[in-house]
Image: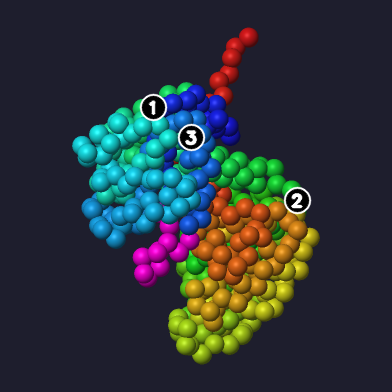
Amino acid sequence: MELLQLKKLNLKDKKVFIRCDFNVPMDEFGNIADDRRIRSAISTINYCLDQDCAVILASHFGRPKSEVVEKYSMAPIARRLQQLLKRHVELAPGVVDDVTMQIARKLPRHEVLLLENLRFEPGETKDDEELSKKLASMAEFYVNDAFGVSHRAHASVHGITKFFDNEHKAAGFLLEREINFFSKLMNNPVRPFAAIVGGSKVSGKLEALVNLLPKVDKIFIGGGMAFTFLKQMGYEIGASLVEDDLLEEAQHIMDEAKKLGVKFYLPVDVVAAQKFSEDSVSKIVTAQEIPHEWMGLDIGPATVRLYREGLNDVQTILWNGPMGVYEMDKFARGSSKIAHFVADSYSTTVVGGGDTADLVQRVGVDEDISFISTGGGASLELLEGKTLPGVEPLMIKMTQTKD
């Protein structure tokens, strides 16, 4: 797919509205714990400033549920932006109130205005046309650089695009990079191509698995979702997480993998515990013999060795979803060991955002991954073969001409 490009817009001396994704994690003291999403937007913002533009930035932050909540103010993000851009960033008092609209109207070139949290407005998540129109009226150009929220049909992502023609809207550099990377990965990967798919439930990854099967050479399953497959194979899985209504789907995926010649790997051993807690008694057991009241919470050492062997010859690795309950140190070893192996490999390595991006950063190998997506939900929908609502209006439609 080809996107409308920022560099092809005539931005000189104009006002640009950039939708960013500054929804960053905060620690218990109210400090930004990971500013990767803010840093990822800097190149797009600086490019527009270099074109002598006035720049209006907009993002959501947290889940304030359509009302003003002080802890979800964009103030800490404005401060971090100032540090990264090395220039003043004005924080608007609101989103589309009269004072904010007046500031936006008078914003001089080379100045940066950050709107308050978009989700303070009830119309944002409803893709409200009136809100979209007001946001669009602030600038002559619209740029979407918020990959992490482009799977949402929201006013600042989808509705706003209706008020700009193709000469006045484009994808930012981050969004373009994400889309191009996943497009190449899904359509023209260097082979052998392996997918590591984890997470708690099959239901969350079902469409992605179905879409990945014809494209990959190997699939490695981990996390809670593995137990639905293991139960379908007749194994004793104890009290492990299982989706009984998806047992047939699990069988269909395994049958389809066999038919397509895709190597399908499942855990051969697990770290099982009596209860879901850090202080629980735990032990390593084979995948066939999890004790009745116990639950599997991580892949075991034999599975780690098996997966390493299977990944040894691959040239491209896509990883979406952890191998266990990595938030608890006791059940993080499997995910950690796979993370180190993926980072050390000479393959092209892609991490699909969300929990997996958090995991590789916790382990400290994020610098050694070829590409880490900034959006968990958005990257998952791309893997499912879907067109994102925030990206579709920025795609160049190929028109057929008659001779």
Q: Nearer the viewer, residue 259 or 54?
A: 54
Amino acid under disc 2: Arg
Q: Which numbered disc, 1 or 2, marks the residue that appears first in the sequence? A: 1
Q: Are marks 1 and 2 in contact (CB under 8 Å)?
A: no
Q: Which mark is residue 48?
A: 3
Crowd band around label 3 with a 10 angstrom C-alpha radius: few (<14), some (14–19), many (20+): many
Alpha-carbon span between mark 3 and mark 1 = 13 Å
Look at the image and give the residue range highlighted in magenta. 22-34
Q: Which mark is residue 168?
A: none
Q: Residue 335 in the image: x percent, y percent?
A: 60, 71
Q: Which numbered disc, 2 or 3, marks the residue that appears first in the sequence? A: 3
Amino acid under disc 1: Glu
Q: Which numbered disc, 3 or 1, marks the residue that appears first in the sequence? A: 3
**Relative to 141, is 187 above or below?**
below
Q: Nearer the viewer, residue 83 or 398?
A: 83
The residue drawn where x is 60% and y is 68% is 364
**Relative to 36, is 92 above or below?**
above
